[in-house]
Image (tube, rainbow, N blue to C red):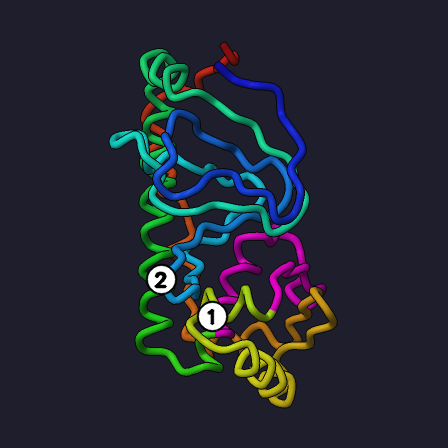
Amino acid sequence: MKRAPRAVSAGDWLWHEGDSADTLLVLREGWACSARYLPDGSRQLLEIFLPGDILGFGELADGARRNDVSMLTDGEISEYSYSHLRELFERAPRLRSALFVIANQRQAMLAERLVSIARRNARERLAHFLCECHARLQEPANDARQGFLLPLSQQDLADALGMSPVHISRTFSSLACLGLVRRQHYHIQILDPVRLERLAGFNGAYLQCDTQLLAAEPPTTIEPG
């Protein structure tokens, strides 16, 4: 069944690694992240979730949470039981196609993060991350130079990009000196989107959904059960 949307706060845990996985979440508002914690106390941020993202569908098969997931900001979530989803899949095959498209997109994003950590230098790595976040948030009519909120601390960014907080700060300063980015607290302004994308080697095609997979079937109205 679908449960009533509920408010969550920055720092709230949505689940821990190893917890039983019996629900799927839709992030209606706010930012969240998944992470893996290492024995030495360090962590690696694996995914950054933005409003509208679906959390937990990758665990439908094995029934156990693979990573810790927590809120980065205040927000709101909707929760759906896996048993209800199975009913929806029977009634709405197009929903299965949509989740397949989302899973492919998520895999492509993880692949790009791996390339960044393994092969891109610090400026390229941070620039690519900023381009990706902006592309995921951006409405088509918006000017990139209007900027966007990036509610991640320097430690969060360091744990996502495999850098130190000091290195993150220096790299932001370097991008600012190049006239590419301006940062004021959590607000990011992209001063020269074309040059920033060129520096990052950013091609946003991997963020685009394959709408052909969804066009084969007519839209299906789904009522929460």
Specify start and end residues of the magenta stretch as a single range. 126-153
Is residue 121 magenta-colored? no
Residue appearing at x 43%, y 54% in the figure: 35
Residue 128 tag number: 1
- In the image, residue 72 lies at what x, y percent? 60, 51
Q: Is residue 145 left or right of residue 64?
A: right
Name the residue that disc number 2 marks.
Answer: 39
Q: Is residue 150 left or right of residue 82?
A: right
Element marked by disc 1: helix
The residue at the far left in this view is 62
Mark 1: amino acid: His
Residue 87 sits above or below residue 124 on the image: above
- In the image, residue 99 lies at what x, y percent? 36, 33
- In the image, residue 1 lies at what x, y percent? 48, 14
Is residue 133 magenta-colored? yes
Q: Picture quarter containing residue 195?
A: bottom right
Residue appearing at x 39%, y 55% in the figure: 36
Element marked by disc 2: loop
